[in-house]
Image (spheres, grey):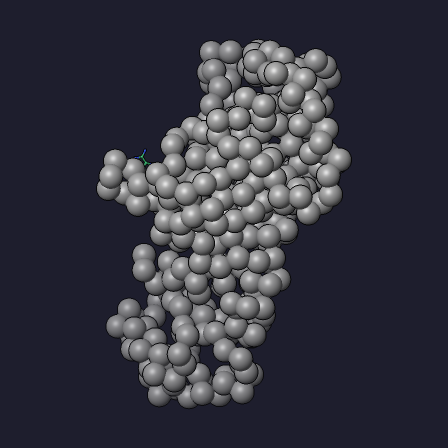
Amino acid sequence: MVEEAVEAKNQAVNKSLKEIVVETKNLEKIYDGKVHAVRGVNFELFDGEVLGFLGPNGAGKTTTISILLGIIQKTKGDFSIYGKDINDYKTIRELIGYTPQELVFYDFLTVQENAELFADCYQIQNKKARINELFDLFQLTELKRRRAEKLSGGQKRRLNLVLGMLHSPKILFLDEPSAGMDPQSRHILWENIERLSKKEGISIILTTHLMEVADRLCDRILIIDYGKIIAQGTPDELKTTYGAEELIELIMDESLDAKLNDSFIVDLRKEFSKITFHENKIKIFTKNGASLIPDIIEIAVKLDVTDYIKSLQLRGSTLEDVFIGLTGKALRE
Ligand SMILES: Nc1ncnc2c1ncn2[C@@H]1O[C@H](COP(=O)(O)OP(=O)(O)OP(=O)(O)O)[C@@H](O)[C@H]1O
Ligand SMILES: [Mg+2]
């Protein structure tokens, strides 16, 4: 079994960058005959790439990952990993790593004991060296004698991540790995994931709600909503295809009367077809922003709200604009 896995791993390493390592065809999941969580998902993960799953809560990201890992059963469709189906998983299991959305380790064991236990499960040869390497990278060395239950939320996340990577997997599934981390920890996390994916040639499927992270780290992104892929491409392709060429962003003063604010948006909607409004930010998606600014000001003057415009900015689209434009969550919630 180990020999087969090593051979599969060697084959994987030797193949070209464009090899497909994960493939799904019309994958579907209906929970309990009722909740249609995944509704026909088709995608490929190529060798060495970081593929991002972006989607609102409940979109079906974790469900898709859980099917691929063999944790839950698909309802319909097909998928393969290294060309093998679920029945052949024993030959490829060692090539797969997983950091689940929830924390999975033993609270009553220390950081070091958890790592050793997980390393033993995978029969890792150079256990001590690998643990030390990952502890150094994810800054857990100082904490290795601490009981896991006593770690902070962000430290627990880092331990969760290390445990999924100890056996040097070739495909890594990271489900919201940075939840609850402070900006510094997130920075360390993303830098190291980038470094490891390059150094060890890991292919990664990553879910995150952090758009800047997805933009920087992912080679390609799938935007998933209601169990379907509604858009896909490189971050730049998504911005070019789905983002407006330009975006006018108005930040309104919180003291503006809610009714007046609504009237302002209603009047803007009469002039501009694509507007989103979230908290005190109004975004107008357009092709020729500069020429439209006088029209916006005119509407603001008519309603006497100019004093409540804290800022008005013209800029290019971000991935977050694309995401909100496509899923409309800011409008729906
Ligand atoms: N075990 C289950 N039984 C029944 N329904 C479930 C189960 N697990 C998930 N669901 C439902 O399936 C849908 C998809 O859930 P999933 O966890 O895949 O979403 P997600 O995209 O990972 O969301 P999040 O961003 O919040 O993590 C949701 O409506 C959820 O309530
Ligand atoms: Mg999830």
Please give the name of the residue rendered at 67% of the width and 43% of the height, measured from the top-left corner: 19
Q: What x and y, as percent, mark residue 231?
A: 49, 59
**Nearer to me, 269 or 11:** 11
Is residue 322 visible to the viewer in this orientation of the structure?
Answer: yes
Where residue 33 sits in the image (x, y, percent)?
A: 24, 39
The image quadrant of residue 170 is top right
Q: Residue at 38% across / 36% down in the picture? A: 74
In this image, 130 relative to 61: left or right? Answer: right
Residue 196: where, in percent of width, then height? 70, 35
> Could one spot residue 159 in this view of the protein?
no
Where residue 83 appears, as percent x and y from the top left, is 58, 36
Q: Looking at the figure, which quarter contains the C terminus?
A: bottom left
Image mark count: 0
Residue at 32% over, 60% down: 332
Quarter of the rendering occupied by the N terminus: top right
Q: Is residue 189 above or below residue 42?
A: above
Which residue appears at 45% of the width and 70% of the height? 283
Q: Nearer the viewer, residue 209 or 203?
A: 203
Q: Observer-nearest residue: 219 or 150? A: 219
Quarter assignment of residue 262? bottom left
Comparing 227 with 159, the one in front is 227
Horizontal side of residue 288 vs 262, given as left or right: right
